[in-house]
Amino acid sequence: MTSCHNAEDPIKKVAIFGGTHGNELTGVFLVKHWLENGAEIQRTGLEVTPFITNPRAVKKCTRYIDCDLNRVFDLENLGKKMSEDLPYEVRRAQEINHLFGPKNSEDSYDIIFDLHNTTSNMGCTLILEDSRNDFLIQMFHYIKTSLAPLPCYVYLIEHPSLKYATTRSVAKYPVGIEVGPQPQGVLRADILDQMRKMIKHALDFIHNFNEGKEFPPCAIEVYKIMEKVDYPRNENGEIAAFIHPNLQDQDWKPLYPGDPVFLTLDGKTIPLGGDCTVYPVFVNEAAYYEKKEAFAKTTKLTLNAKSIHSSLH
């Protein structure tokens, strides 16, 4: 049985965001470089705009000034009356929505690549927000194949109650790129090289698609978020146990019920509860202490995409 062919409009406008979190330096440095010399990100017939998303946070080398820019792109914040009383990142979100959106409109940018680093041992990670998006599944398949044998994981953040309201969600096709491990405020050459390659392959895919290349049906393995797990806490709400050495740096590896997850200062091990195997991500991420998240549990599944080609051809 042949799958039906999805003809999609060619991609015209792409943005690459760096510095959504001002202390995640790979994206900051790549975007600053491309603003000076963008030859490597240009493709025929494609408008590619590199952009520093949170300039004040970048200047201070801090995650954000008033609140997390990567969580405020909901319609409520974007619709607030502009005033000096608004948190800096909410005002910035409205500016970004004006420049690259408006969100959920025909005028919005086709694709936004949002570049992030994690302190967790997640390697090259693509973040997908919609499991039914054939175009993005095809793109992620292309990037994964092009990077091989270097692993590239796909984190699916579709969830009935966890809503992210990400910076990149202004675009029709939002793509999160997360590469680690890298400490905040630090640049590592290997991590920079990996992120640079991910962007190169993504832009090559778009170019091939726009040129009329047909991508046959494909499948990718993804890790879908189930729930976030907080650190054990005492009655004052302070952290009472830390990530167990057996779990540290084991992002994407299977975690079985009864496996050690946390360790207290007096040496007590706290195991994983429940009755199913999970795959932990963002293990011991520095930025998530304030969000009360020690790691996220995911489940592994396969997504299929139909054949796609651009409607011009």
Image (cartoon, helix red, strand yellow):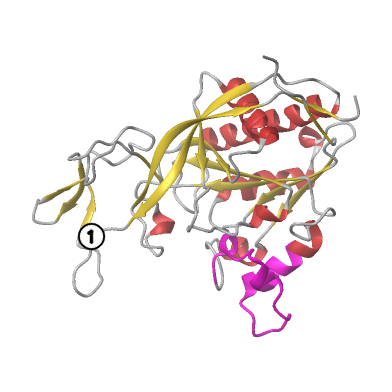
Residue 299: quarter of image: top left
> Looking at this rendering, what residue extends furthest in the top direction?
1
Whether residue 170 appears in magenta in the rendering, the answer is no
Q: Which residue is mark 1?
A: 232
The answer to whether residue 52 is above or below residue 120 is below
Whether residue 74 appears in magenta in the rendering, the answer is yes
Give the class, few, some or many, for how many residues have Cα within 10 Å of label 1's Cα (few <14, many ≥20): some
Q: Position of residue 69 (x, y in %)?
A: 59, 63
Q: Quadrant of the C terminus?
A: top right
Query: How many numbered discs?
Result: 1
Start and end of the magenta stretch? Answer: 67-96
The answer to whether residue 58 is above or below residue 146 is below
Q: Position of residue 202 (x, y in %)?
A: 69, 32
Q: Position of residue 71 (x, y in %)?
A: 56, 62
The answer to whether residue 156 is above or below residue 218 is below
Residue at left offset 75%, top offset 57%: 104
Q: Quadrant of the N terminus?
A: top right
> Looking at this rendering, what residue extends furthest in the front direction?
1
Residue 253 is left or right of residue 54, and the answer is left
Residue at left offset 60%, top offset 56%: 166
- Say which element carries label 1: loop
